[in-house]
Image (cartoon, grey):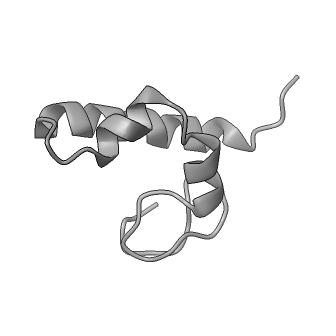
Amino acid sequence: MSYSDEKCPCGGKKQRDTMICADCETAFAERHEMTRYKDETVAIDLRRHAAIILLSLARGRKRKRS
């Protein structure tokens, strides 16, 4: 996974220079981490932490639930 490629951590296809695909953004739109990540007035450390959580959630989004 890279910021400059087209592969989302969930396995889907994303736009270049984005972190996650549109499906993941929609799935996590109501989460506090997404609003914190997109808020440019929040300290960079808090935004980075929110991004790490979102990436972790994206990796497990399509995983088969048992």
Which residue is found at the position 59% from the left and 43% from the top?
Answer: 59
Q: Position of 5 compared to 10: left or right?
A: left
User: Could you say where residue 66 lies in the image, as x and y percent from the top left?
Assistant: 88, 22
Residue 45 appears in the picture as rendered: yes
User: Could you say where residue 13 lies in the image, as x and y percent from the top left?
Assistant: 62, 70
Q: Quadrant of residue 36?
A: top left
Q: Position of 34 compared to 45: left or right?
A: right
Q: How many marks?
A: 0
User: Could you say where residue 48 lies in the image, as x and y percent from the top left?
Assistant: 24, 39
Which residue is found at the position 84% from the left and 28% from the top?
Answer: 65
Q: Position of 64 compared to 41: left or right?
A: right
Nearest the viewer among 36 and 60 is 36
Q: Quadrant of residue 19?
A: bottom left
Which residue is found at the position 32% from the left and 48% from the top?
Answer: 38
Which residue is found at the position 55% from the left and 51% from the top?
Answer: 25
Nearest the viewer among 36 and 59 is 36
